[in-house]
Amino acid sequence: MPLTMIERFQRGLELSADRPAVRIGSETITYRQVHETALLWAGSLKAAGSPRAVGVLAGKSRESYIGLLAVLYAGATVVPLQPNFPAALTRRMLDVAGVDTVIADEDGLAVLPEIVDQETTVRVLDTRDVAGRFPVIPVVPDSKMAAPAQVAPSDRAYILFTSGSTGIPKGVPILHGGFAHYFEELHNRCDFVPDDVFAQTYDLNFDPGIHDVFAAWGAGAMMQVVPPSAYRDLPTFLAEHGVTVWHSTPSGIWMTREMGGLEKGSLPGLRWSFFGGEALRCRDVVDWLAAAPASKLENLYGPTEFSIGICWHRWSGEESEKGGVNGTVPIGKVHAGNDFRLVAEQGEQSDEEGELWITGPQIAPGYLNPADDAGRFVEFEGRRWYRTGDRVRKNPDGELVFIGRVDAQVKVHGWRVELAEVDHVVRGCEGVRDAVTVPRPAAHGTELIVFYTGDEVPEPTLAERVRAVLPASTLPRRYVHMDTLPLNANRKVDRLALRRRAEELPGGQAAPQS
């Protein structure tokens, strides 16, 4: 039977009570310490009025890891929040999620005065002697819970917010049942053991970060927080800390490559490597596995609205390369028990290609604001489906391949242009490392701008390559060389920032305001 997140930690506690659950810099916290402290904090929260949603305003710190478990132990809903987010954005998240209680580390406490105002007030669990600075909930030893609260599959476990790359972030409540199904699928195919050490590269407000925490804790393994500075010499960092399980966005590969960390055999200790969050390129996988020859590698796919991930593909060399599109790795098969359909432009179902719709036990019940559901959560044939906005192709073997966003197919002078196809062609030019194509408004309609990294290549050379796949009237207007592509807070390529930069280039026009 699938385990809840609480039960997964309990299993890890049984396996590894006095072994490390998480290591943050020089600080190591055991399973028993996490458990006992979480019971104390949870009891104190309940004694103060059983809050329904508790914000964890913290970086990768003691408060973040113990805090998230304490909230779950109290039977409440975790709302992870980042201290480095704009105060107005965090204030909105608190209001939308109905948070009036916060667990905060030093970074969180430092920014809290900017967040709260007369309309947004919170109480702070007093884990760091904050009395006098904020209204507090005291940590009272007599209130310590004897055991975690019982939760139902239909109870909310987390509230996460979408990245907001296309607008204002939406609040997504994720249920205990959805998480339980996801982790059961992961457990059934991956042989994690107590001796494993999981790299924690993601923040906990990004759902892959939750994957790392409970994948590790369900096996009685340890999480190792990876600071950004580790990329300067990732092989040494992973070796010194005994890391065996890696998980990051594909950008983590090129960051490591840029620092010279992908020499052959340089990552010998890895047993598992996971990548997700954006399209994974076959060329990057080959480079990574040359450095980590003992590792199995999976490409994970899934929107926040589907409890971390809904598809997976295990890399199998040439077969994976043949099954991909535009040099990317397939996203694979949908988790057992869930269902999908591909919907063509006219709304009919396709057996080959279309927008990916998904339904099943991992689906979120909808957004916190029901008005946001329109166009995303739809009723069809008596079932509730989520429209991903991703265009996907189904291979003969049943595996799915990501082609691009539905809104990433643009028309230039009447021609439909696949931005991912342009990216792929430019990446094939000698010396080019990566490329991202974005549209920008122009006097004559829409034109394309390509941003690329690697060696600076003459524009005529790049244009000649692209001319092989696009009519002359649709060729990109500019090819802009960059040292690195910008990343957003989740370490995905920040396409919104690139679009803004494209509009600022000579000849560009500001996009119309909606």
Image: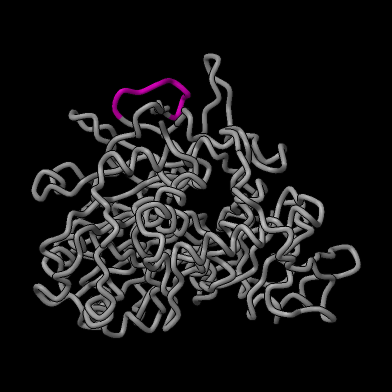
Residue that extends furthest to the right in the rendered view of this protein:
118
Residue 314 belongs to the span the image colors magenta: no
Left of 422 or right of it: where is 27? right
* In the foreground, 335 or 78: 78
* In the foreground, 511 or 92: 92
Left of 294 or right of it: where is 227? right
Q: Quadrant of residue 487?
A: bottom left
Q: Is residue 502 above or below residue 240?
A: above
Residue drawn at 89 percent across, 63 percent down: 119
Residue 295: x and y in percent read 16, 59
- Which range of residues does the magenta coloring cover? 345-352
The structure's colour scheme is one colour
Residue 65: x and y in percent read 53, 65
Residue drawn at 39 percent across, 50 percent down: 218
Quadrant for the N terminus, please. top left
Q: Does residue 50 appear in this view?
A: yes
Residue 199: x and y in percent read 34, 67
Residue drawn at 33 percent across, 31 percent down: 353
Is most of the magenta stretch helix, strand or loop? loop
* In the foreground, 404 or 192: 192
Q: Does residue 419 appear in this view?
A: no
Q: Is residue 391 above or below residue 132?
A: above
Left of 291 or right of it: where is 371? right
Left of 59 or right of it: where is 241? left
Residue drawn at 60 percent across, 48 percent down: 147
Q: Quadrant of residue 40?
A: bottom right
Residue 110: x and y in percent read 70, 82
